[in-house]
Amino acid sequence: MRIRTSRPLLALTALAPLAACVSFSAKPPPSLLTISSAASVPAGQTRSSADVPTITIMVPAVSQALATTRVPVQTSATDLAYIANAQWVEPPARLFARLLSDTVAAKTGRVVLSTTQSIADPGARLTGELRAFGVEAGSNQAVVVFDAALMRQQGNVIEKRRFEARVPVSEIAAGPAGVSINQAANQVAGEVADWVGR
């Protein structure tokens, strides 16, 4: 006795083993990394632009290497890799801009404005380029480099300054790298706030 099997059923049966091997979307890492400010404005505190200076902090420009949520590792002068299973919760430029805003507000007492809020009175303007925000394999260090450009309220003069911080990394892996990059980013943000506030 012959058993007839439909061709669609045979095709599905043949493809079943492939389903375990093929993925059409990237597998998410076990957890996502973020950074947080070591300085913060107390809850419930009100500040007014009528009483204190304002500043607008723009999201910094980045290279293609940082225009991703992955964590870069500089393995040589010309080679770049990414840490396996390490991913930021959002692009580094936005994380760093938020950290700068929190730190500048806490350390200088200024009212920090968003781009939308700054239309009427932008006050001082802080822009720049985030040049490094990752790990350097040769030195086992987290490296954050920010080229800042500040236009104070007095005239159209622009001041430029490079800020750099290096923090040792115990292991080039998601958790240790995230902790060290957070420390380096806070160091840079603190130095930027001191510069802005003087």
Image: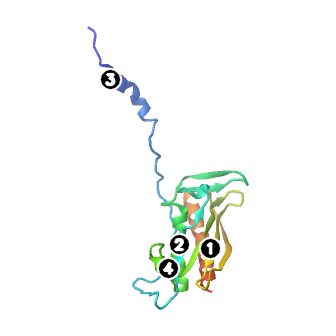
Where the C terminus falls, by quadrant?
bottom right
Q: Are marks 2 and 4 in contact (CB under 8 Å)?
A: no
Is any atom of residue 38 visible in this view?
A: no
- The type of colouring in the image is rainbow
Closer to the chain start, of discs 2 and 4, is 2
Closer to the chain start, of discs 4 and 1, is 4
Task: Look at the picture and state if 41 lies above or below 168.
Answer: below
Q: Residue at x 59, y 80 (%)?
A: 193
Are there few (<14), some (14-19), or many (20+) residues within 10 Å of tag 4?
many
Residue topped by disc 3: 8
Where the N terminus falls, by quadrant?
top left
Q: Is residue 198 left or right of residue 20?
A: right
Task: Look at the picture and state if 73 lies above or below 163.
Answer: above
The number of callouts visible is 4
Choose mark 3 or mark 4, whichever is in front: 4
Instruction: Give the distance between the C-alpha atoms of the residues marked 3 and 1, in whole angstroms.
Output: 61 Å
- The circle on residue 147 is none
SS category of the residue bearing label 1: helix
Instruction: Give the distance between the C-alpha atoms of the residues marked 4 and 1, in whole angstroms.
Output: 18 Å
Residue type at mark 3 is: Pro
Q: Are marks 3 and 2 in contact (CB under 8 Å)?
A: no
x and y, in percent, of residue 182 in the image? 57, 68
Residue type at mark 4 is: Val
x and y, in percent, of residue 124 in the image? 56, 81
Residue topped by disc 1: 188
- The circle on residue 99 is 2
Residue type at mark 2 is: Leu
Instruction: Give the distance between the C-alpha atoms of the residues marked 3 and 4, in whole angstroms.
Output: 62 Å
Q: Of 42 and 151, which appears nearest the observer?
A: 151
- The circle on residue 112 is 4
